[in-house]
Image (cartoon, rainbow, N blue to C red):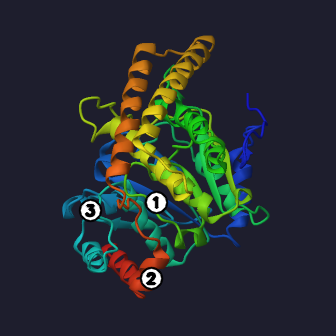
């Protein structure tokens, strides 16, 4: 049963009545005459062969309010790209595939590299960045949503609720973050958010003192959700992180650019499950281990830009503080799972906390020893300033790739 508690500095839009999808979509169709809407789907080719994407597309076919669907396709050769064009042809909406490994977009990437503006790290962040560039180039929409392609519990209502706050012309939100309960198959999931992000924020509040930024982060019910929406003009100044700090980096950018009254979060699903990453205890460059390091770096970099002085002594104290608070959270979540009849492996939970604690120090070491590291890709405003016709090049490359 949903609550209606507003417990942070951003607005929380709850699911209080399980309003019928038909009503939401009828309103969105009406809004679309004033606020055309796009959806961005960042995808690996392997996801076309997985169990989630096909049902997602079959459901999206009925999202009549969408003006455009933009698919960012990574790790695909020419044969796979041709297959993808056929695969996505089931969509009745205007749709375009960004073949990120194709010669035309590679040429655009080299053009940007000559100016020192091309993304240097492959991954979701780069994929999303180019998709946003195409959305700006096409000019077809005024609001855009993004969600992943590996959601095995997908329902079209997720998208409707996600984009509604920025599509409704009577609302004043520039950005909306989705949230949901990470319960699937009788288990409590979402370890990185539960056991790293929230305890880390609470620990930093003890170490550095009161911070409006930390209060802001702590207001998000699921800060690592990959689902968000925004007005298209937000894309011009948005700096997308290139590492696994994407979600934290985006909401941090929104904090930098907009008042908190223009930012909200919305309940989009009762049940949510997707592809799970391995913990990867033996390789800090993979899985949840790397994710935890990148997320920690994203938060501490933001604190540094606000004038916080952070030393290795700070990170050692932070590790100890985090470890104690995180273990308390393990107990809380264990009790919450038990009363609800859910399964939770307490041993694995505490092993995750131990790994995250080590990675806090690792992130601090990287931060101190690489002060000039710039994980953010440039804003599209900066790119356009350096290469005034860049959006034309992006648009033409994508259109040529999608012909036939």
User: How many labels, in total?
Assistant: 3
Q: Nearer the viewer, mark 2 or mark 3?
A: 2
Relative to the observer, which residue lies in front, 12 or 2?
A: 12
- The residue where tag 2 is placed is 384
Question: Which element type, helix, strand or loop, lies under badge 2?
Answer: helix
Q: Nearer the viewer, mark 3 or mark 1?
A: 3
Q: Position of residue 65 (x, y in %)?
A: 62, 62
Quadrant of the rendered image containing residue 117: bottom left
- First of labels 1, 2 by sequence position: 1
Taking the image as shown, residue 73 lies to the left or right of residue 309, namely left
Question: How many angstroms separate mark 1 from mark 2 (CA)?
Answer: 31 Å
- First of labels 3, 1 by sequence position: 3
Q: Position of residue 191 (x, y in %)?
A: 47, 29
Question: Which element type, helix, strand or loop, lies under badge 3?
Answer: helix
| Residue lying at 54% horizontally and 51% vertically, measured from the top left | 308
- The residue where tag 3 is placed is 81
Q: Looking at the figure, which quarter contains the N terminus?
A: top right
Relative to the observer, which residue lies in front, 240 or 84?
A: 240
Q: Looking at the figure, which quarter contains the C terminus?
A: bottom left
Q: Residues within 10 Å of mark 3 (few under 14, many from 20)?
A: many
Q: Residues within 10 Å of mark 1 (few under 14, many from 20)?
A: some
Q: Residues within 10 Å of mark 2 (few under 14, many from 20)?
A: few
| Residue lying at 63% horizontally and 41% vertically, measured from the top left | 209
Taking the image as shown, residue 242 lies to the left or right of residue 35, namely left
Quadrant of the rendered image containing residue 255: bottom right
* Callout 2 touching callout 3 (CB < 8 Å): no
In this view, 316 is above or below 132: above
Q: Which mark is residue 184?
A: none
In this view, 34 is above or below 240: below
Question: Which element type, helix, strand or loop, lies under badge 1?
Answer: loop
- The residue where tag 1 is placed is 91
């Amino acid at each position: 049963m949903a609550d209606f508690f507003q417990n942070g500095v951003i607005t929380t839009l709850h699911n209080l009545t399980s309003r019928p999808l038909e009503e939401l979509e009828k309103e969105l169709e009406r809004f679309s005459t004033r606020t055309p809407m796009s959806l961005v789907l960042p995808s690996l080719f392997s996801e076309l062969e997985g169990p989630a994407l096909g049902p997602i597309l079959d459901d999206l076919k009925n999202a009549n309010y969408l003006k455009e669907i933009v698919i960012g396709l990574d790790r695909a050769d020419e044969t796979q790209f041709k297959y993808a064009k056929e695969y996505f042809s089931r969509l009745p909406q205007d749709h375009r595939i960004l073949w990120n490994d194709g010669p035309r977009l590679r040429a655009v990437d080299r053009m940007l590299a000559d100016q020192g503006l091309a993304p240097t790290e492959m991954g979701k962040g780069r994929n999303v960045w180019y998709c946003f560039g195409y959305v700006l180039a096409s000019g077809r929409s005024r609001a855009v949503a993004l969600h992943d392609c590996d959601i095995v519990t997908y329902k079209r209502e997720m998208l409707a609720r996600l984009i509604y706050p920025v599509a409704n012309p009577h609302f004043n939100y520039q950005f909306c973050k989705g949230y949901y309960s990470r319960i699937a198959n009788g288990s409590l999931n979402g370890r990185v958010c539960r056991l790293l992000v929230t305890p880390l924020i609470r620990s930093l509040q003890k170490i550095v003192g009161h911070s409006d930024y930390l209060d802001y982060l702590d207001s998000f019910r699921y800060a690592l959700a990959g689902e968000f929406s925004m007005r298209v003009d937000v894309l011009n100044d948005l700096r997308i992180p290139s590492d696994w700090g994407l979600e934290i980096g985006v909401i941090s950018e929104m904090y930098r650019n907009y008042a908190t009254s223009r930012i909200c979060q919305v309940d989009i699903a009762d049940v949510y499950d997707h592809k799970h990453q391995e913990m990867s205890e033996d390789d800090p460059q993979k899985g949840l281990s790397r994710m935890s390091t990148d997320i920690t770096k994203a938060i501490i970099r933001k604190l540094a830009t606000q004038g916080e002085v952070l030393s290795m002594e700070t990170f050692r104290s932070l590790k100890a503080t985090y470890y104690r608070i995180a273990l308390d959270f393990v107990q809380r979540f264990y009790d919450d799972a038990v009363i609800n009849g859910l399964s939770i492996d307490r041993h694995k939970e505490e092993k995750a906390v131990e790994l995250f604690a080590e990675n806090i120090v690792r992130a601090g070491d990287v931060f101190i020893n690489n002060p000039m590291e710039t994980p953010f890709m440039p804003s599209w405003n900066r790119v356009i300033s350096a290469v005034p016709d860049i959006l034309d090049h992006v648009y033409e490359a994508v259109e040529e790739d999608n012909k036939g």
